[in-house]
Amino acid sequence: MTHLPPITRVVTGHAEDGRSIVSEHGPLPTVVEVTAIPGTVFHEVWSTSESPARVSNDADPTTGPLTLPPPPGGTRIRFVDIPPDTEDFLKTGKDQMGEAFAQIGDKAASTVKETSPHPLMHRTESIDYGVVIEGELTLVLDDGEALLKPGSVVVQRGTNHAWANRSGKMCRMLFVLISGSYDPQIAESLADS
C-alpha cells in the first residue's frame, strides 16, 4: 500500500519580550495507524480545549491519547489517510468497528448496523470541515452520497456518515472539528431513531 508523505508542522510562540518565534518545526509527534482498519492513519496537528481559545506558549495538546471528537468547547485539526475499500472490508468490516472506534477514543461514535450502507458509519456531536487534499472519496449518508475530489469541502453537521474510498488509491483528508451540541429538535429525532 502506498503511503502519503509525512506532514511537517510549524508551531509559533512568543519570546519573553513578546517577539514572535518558531516554537516547533518538524514532524507531527502523534501519527497513529488504526490497526483495525489497516492503512488508515491519523495525523494529529493541534487542538484547543475552550472558546475563545487560550493563546499561550502552553505544551503541545496532541501528545496524549488519540481521540476522535474535539474536546468539549474546543477544536481539533488533523489529517486522515484513508485507504481504498477492499471487498473483504466491505463484507466483514462491521465486525471490526467497535475495536476501530475504541482505538480512536470514541467507541460510541460508531453507528454501524447490519443494514448500514458502509461499515464505517459514525456520528459525532460536532461541526466538521473536511477538505480533500489528495485522492478522492465518496461521502456516504443514510440517504445519499457525494463524490469528493481534491479541493472538495464537506461541512459535516453531526450527521451519520462514512468515508468510502472506491478509487483504488490512498486519499488524504484535512479535518477541522469544532465541538457542538445538537439542536433540541435534532437531538430528539436522533433519540427516536
Image (spheres, helix red, strand yellow):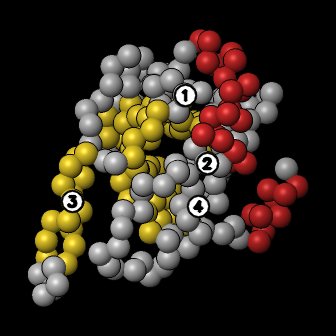
The answer for how far apart the CA atoms under marks 1 and 4 are is 25 Å
Q: Along the horizontal axis of the image, is 53 left or right of 188? A: left
The answer for how far apart the CA atoms under marks 2 and 3 are is 26 Å
Q: Are marks 1 and 3 in contact (CB under 8 Å)?
A: no
Q: Which mark is residue 174?
A: none
Q: Amino acid at mark 3?
A: Glu
Q: From the viewer's side, name the closer residue of 167 and 97.
A: 97
Residue where numbered disc 3 is placed: 24
The answer for how far apart the CA atoms under marks 1 and 3 are is 29 Å
The answer for how far apart the CA atoms under marks 2 and 4 are is 15 Å
Residue 81 vertical position relative to residue 177 in the rendered view, above or below: above
Q: From the viewer's side, name the closer residue of 40 and 182.
A: 40
The quadrant of the picture occupied by the N terminus is top left
The answer for how far apart the CA atoms under marks 2 and 1 are is 13 Å
Residue 92 vertical position relative to residue 183 in the rendered view, above or below: above
The answer for how far apart the CA atoms under marks 3 and 4 are is 29 Å
Comparing labels 1 and 4, the label whose residue is closer to the camera: 1
Residue where numbered disc 4 is placed: 126
Q: Are marks 2 and 3 in contact (CB under 8 Å)?
A: no
Q: Amino acid at mark 4?
A: Ser
